[in-house]
Image (cartoon, coloured by chain):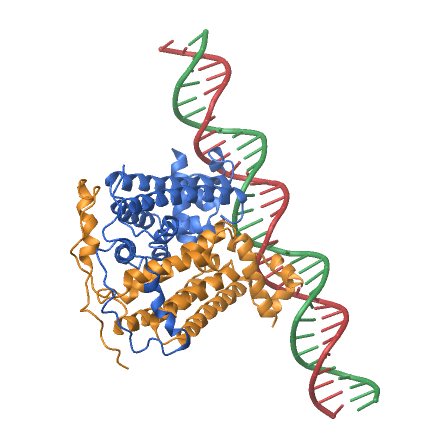
Chain colours: A blue, B orange, C green, D red
Amino acid sequence: VRRDQIARAVLALTADRGVGGINVAAVARRVGVAPSALYRHYASKDAMLAATIERIGARMLANVERARSGSPDPLVALERLLMLQVDLVRQNRGIPFLLFGDGVQRSPGHRRRLLRFLSSFRSALVDLFAEAKRRGRVRAGLDPAALAVQFIGLYVPSAILWNVTRGRFDMKVQAHRAWTVFHEGICVRARTTTRGRRRFPGEGDAGTGARAGTPAARRRLPRSGAKENHR
Amino acid sequence: VRRDQIARAVLALTADRGVGGINVAAVARRVGVAPSALYRHYASKDAMLAATIERIGARMLANVERARSGSPDPLVALERLLMLQVDLVRQNRGIPFLLFGDGVQRSPGHRRRLLRFLSSFRSALVDLFAEAKRRGRVRAGLDPAALAVQFIGLYVPSAILWNVTRGRFDMKVQAHRAWTVFHEGICVRARTTTRGRRRFPGEGDAGTGARAGTPAARRRLPRSGAKENHR
DNA sequence: TGTACATCAGTGAACGCGCGTTCACTGATGTAC
DNA sequence: TGTACATCAGTGAACGCGCGTTCACTGATGTAC
C-alpha cells in the first residue's frame, strides 16, 4: 500500500535528480509523511531502492508476457515488446538511471538483484529469437543471444537521449525506425542476387577500404525459403 | 600533469564504485596525495568530474576523427568507429556510468556539457550516415539521424552488460555481430525479388499477426545500383 | 657565487553541513471480555 | 454497549558519521640582484 507510494516516489525522484539525488527526506516529502515514518515500511534506504528496482524488473517481465500473449509470431511479439518497453520508460523516466546507473555498482546486493533480473529478461528475449529462428523468420547464421542484446540496444540509447534532453526526443518514432532497420537486418529474405552489386568510387582506394565489402560477404544466406516450423 | 592523474583516478573509481562512490579522499589516495592537495588543481569535486567527462568526450570525438581518416568510405569508418568505441569503453569501464548515469542529472552544468558533447558526436555520426546515403551505400528511405542513434545502440547495451557482469561479457564479439545485422539492415541490396516469399505457419492467425509483414513492405528499394558519388 | 624573495604543490587539522537512522512517544483503530 | 488492552502507522527531536571544503603553514624550486 504505502510501499507502492514509496517506490513511485523513489522513481520520480530518480527521474528528477538521478540516483544520487535520492534522499529519504525528499522521498518522505513526496509520500507526505515524516522521514522516520518510512522506516515502518522499509528497513533502510537501500531496501527502498531494492524494492523499486525489483518492481521495475517485474513490470518489464510482465511486458514480455503481455507481448508474448499478443501474438504467436515471435517477431511480432518482439516488436510489440519494444513498444511496451518504450512506453514503460516514457512513463517512468527514472528507469534507465535506476537500472544502468551506479548505485547498482555500490552494494553487491543490488548488483546481484539486477543481474538476476537481466538474465531472466535476456533469456526471455533469447527464447523469442530462438523460436523466430526455428520458424525460419530469422536468418540461420545469427545468434539468438547476440540478437537479444542488440534488441535492448534498440531503445536504450533513445531512453538516454530522451532523459538528457528532458523529453525533447521522440522515443517512439526512433524505436519504430530502429525496429524497421533491425528487422530488415535479421529477416529471411526471399532471394538475393549478388549480380548487380558494384564497387563505389570511394571504395577500395584507401588502406582499409577493401574491408568495405566484407559485411556483405559475411552474410550467410539460408537456402531460399526457410526451415519448416515444427511443434 | 596532475590533472591527468586525477581524471584517471576519477574514472577508475567510477568503474569500481559508480559515480556515487567517488569521494575526494579516495581520489586523493589513488593519486597519492592528501585530499586537500586536489584543490590546488581543481576548484571543487564537481570540477574534477566535469574535467573527466570533458576528457572522455574529447577521446570519443578523437575516435570519430581517427575512424574517418582511416577510410573515405563512411560505412567502413563507422564500423571502425564502433570498434574504437568498444575499445575505449573496455579500457575505461567507468565511462558508461559517467556519461549516462546520474550526477549528470544533478548539476545543470554537467547536463549542458554532456548535451553539447552528445550533439557534436551525434552530428558527426549523422554526417557519416548522410554521406553513406549520398554515396548510395544506405537505402534511401532511412533517416541518418535515426541511424546515428541506432548506431550508438550497437555498443551501449554491451557496455552495460559488460559492466554488470564485471567483464564476463565479450563486447567485441557482440559489437561485431551487431554491426553485421545493422549493416545488413541498412545497406543497399542488389535486387530483391518478392517472389518466393511465403507465409509461415504462425503468421497471420492472431489479431496482430497481420502486421508481421509490414516491415518488409515498408522497405523502399532504391533503383538498382546507387546514386553516383559527387564531390 | 651567494642572499632574499616569490611561487606553488602539498599537508594536516578542523569545520560544518547533509543525511541516514534511532527512539521514546502519540493517537487512531481494531479486539476481547 | 462499554471498558481495557494490543497493534501499528506516524511524529519530531536528536545522534553521529561521512565527506567536501577551508586555512594557516611547510618545504622545495626557481628568479632577481
**B104 up-or-down from A23: above or below:** below
Asked if residue B101 shows in the view, the reply is no
Give the left or right position of residue A14, taking residue B16 as reference. Answer: left
Task: Give B221 or A211, whichever is nearer the viewer.
Answer: A211
**Quadrant location of the C terminus of chain A in the rendered image:** top left
Give the left or right position of residue B206, taking residue A68 as reference. Answer: left
Task: Give A164 or A215, whichever is nearer the viewer.
Answer: A215
Residue at 17% x, 56% y: name it. B217
Q: Residue furthest left?
A: B195
Q: Quadrant of residue B127?
A: bottom left
Task: Give A99 or B149, whichever is nearer the viewer.
Answer: B149
Residue A113: horizontal and vertical position, in percent?
A: 47, 41
Q: Quadrant of residue A193?
A: bottom left
**Quadrant location of the N terminus of chain A in the rendered image:** top left
Residue A160: horizontal and vertical position, in percent?
A: 38, 57
Asked if residue A144 shows in the view, the reply is yes
Residue B226: horizontal and vertical position, in percent?
A: 22, 72
Task: Give C11 or A24, whichever is nearer the viewer.
Answer: C11
Residue at 62% x, 57% y: name it. B25
Residue B29: horizontal and vertical position, in percent?
A: 65, 59
